[in-house]
Amino acid sequence: MIDARHLIVGGAIALTGALAPLFLLDGGTGTVHASGPQDPAPSVANTNAANPPAALDDRSGLRPVSNEPLPLVVEIVRDEDGTEYATVVGTNVSIRSVLERIAKSTERLLWGFGDDERGLTTPLVTVELRDRPLTEVVEYMLGTAGLVGEIDANVINVRADRTSENRDTLLSRALAGYSRASYRFPNHELAAAARLAQGAIEELRGLDQAALSHYQLLIDAHSTSSLVLEAHMRSGALLQGQGEWARAIEEYRRVTELTPADLDEATQADTTMDAAEATMEDYFRAAHLEIARCNLELGHADWAIQMLNVLERKHPAATRQGIVDRRILRARCYLEDGKFIESLKVLDELERGFVTHDDMVKMLGLRARCFDALDLRPEAARAWVIHAHQVEEPERSSSFERAAEHFLVLEDYLGVLFLAENARTLDSPANVRTAERIARAALGLSVTMDEENSTIDERVAAARAATEREDWSLATQLLSPLFRELEIVPVELRDDVALEWSATLYATSGITQAIGALRTARKLFERTQPEDMTRLDARAGQLFEQGGRFDLALDAYDGNY
């Protein structure tokens, strides 16, 4: 995607100077940029001309631009309503000398240079600003040196820009400058680029809706500009980030519907940014790829596959990265469409070529999900562990937890302990403590699992795993205190506690104790969660059947036991 952010030219110190081309209209022209070394600032210059020059009342006589170095020219004129205009032309001239001339010509004091506390310097600049508002001329020149100033009827006050390293402040100032330019000169040849830059700045500030508004204004006001393509692409990307897949498709579809005839050739000058060599064909490819991606997110994996097939036939990828992007998306589509083997084949093909680290991480995640779907637990567990080491949180925790599930089912308890230690080493908050405790218990290692170092959820999960393994000792240790305080157990966990405890009692103490526990739990459930009583009744009936008491089983299923 074309990067419009470079329009914030030169970062902090060239911020205002970068806006100059947008103001050079209606007879005003000019450029200004820093050049040469900086001179230390001498003492304060307090200038006061007794008689203003004739130029204050005469806007004629400006010198033509020459390729030869020009002596410093500073001329000031004032229009009928008192607005002052300045013409400043010079090569490798000191900002201080320019401001001294301006101050003298306008009978103002110049403050700031030579103040030891401020430590201001006066860099050399090459400047050509003609017939521009005086305040803008001062702003542009100071901006090239990282300085700011205020100008009123009597004083030009210069000071160091103490916010030059404050990103948010710089972005706000850049946005204000572009906004002012767009408002004053809506039909300038760079107006579309300015609007695109405003959207890019809002993206940097995290204000996606504001960015979308700027892109839409560009599309509406400059419909024949080549930057309309970029505005649609950026809008689509923002909408994708918000999960607005259908709206994003509309933005991308607009790109595919545009033709060279829809764009004014004169606007090709707009595309002067990095990556501006992108052709309409490049935009077409990118837009179709994103449409396929959006369809996948909407659950239409089959449509996305068809779009990729058509795109491959009619518009093959032009770069290696383009090929990789398409194949990764195809692997995702096959995965979501239930074609797991096909997905793995695509990933295998990709791995035989060069891919970036970021793409490799995506492929690891897809491969692990395919193994999950195919119930290839050993492969899935290993893939998730590798994936966890390549990503950041919260993905890392999720990958560790999924690997732990597979290791437990495989009864690879050493694998669980290895994984838990890995998670601790990486300071991951992954919830693998329960799996680790289950593994330690299964291996006969000491397990501490009480109220102080585990949650109720963890203890219930560990108890469930213990009963599945018929580890009745651990199950009793975990469930007995929970059942005694059943009323304070979270509602959603009470039936699990009661059912697992009844199974444990049946195995260790017999049917009478197990039915007694279910009866106690049922009395509580009648008051707090009657909808869950049927699970208790079903368990009571099953226990009677296992004990050969079929006469009592029928009554138990009806809630009588």
Image (tube, rainbow, N blue to C red):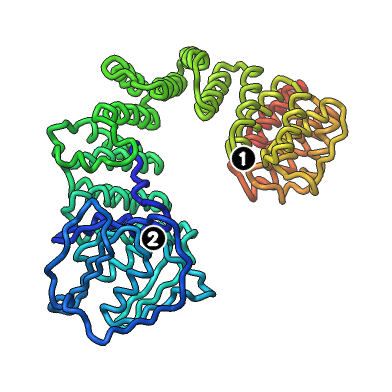
Q: Quadrant of residue 186?
A: bottom left
Residue 337 visible in the snapshot? no
> Who's the residue at 28% across and 47% down the image?
215
In the rendered view of the protein, which quadrant contains the C terminus? top right
Dividing the picture into quadrants, the one containing residue 229 is: top left
Residue at horizontal 36%, vertical 39%? 237
The quadrant in which residue 271 appears is top left
Decide if residue 440 is in sight here. Answer: yes
The x, y position of residue 533, in whole percent, is 63, 39
* Residue named by callout 2: 124
Q: For the point 23% across and 59% down, which residue is it?
A: 23
**Residue 45 locus on image (x, y percent):** 40, 78
- Identify the residue under disc 1: 532
Q: Secondary structure at mark 2?
A: strand
Q: Dot 1, crowdedness within 10 Å: few (<14), some or many (≥20)?
A: some
Residue 117 position (above or below residue 91): below
- In the rendered view, tell whether residue 444 sits above or below residue 432: above
Q: Looking at the image, is mark 1 or mark 2 earlier in the sequence?
A: 2
Amino acid type at mark 2: Leu
Residue type pointed to by label 1: Asp
Q: Judge from the rendering whether residue 74 lies leftward or rightward of residue 503; answer left or right.
A: left
Residue in view at x 41 percent, y 55 percent: 36
Q: Quadrant of the N terminus?
A: top left
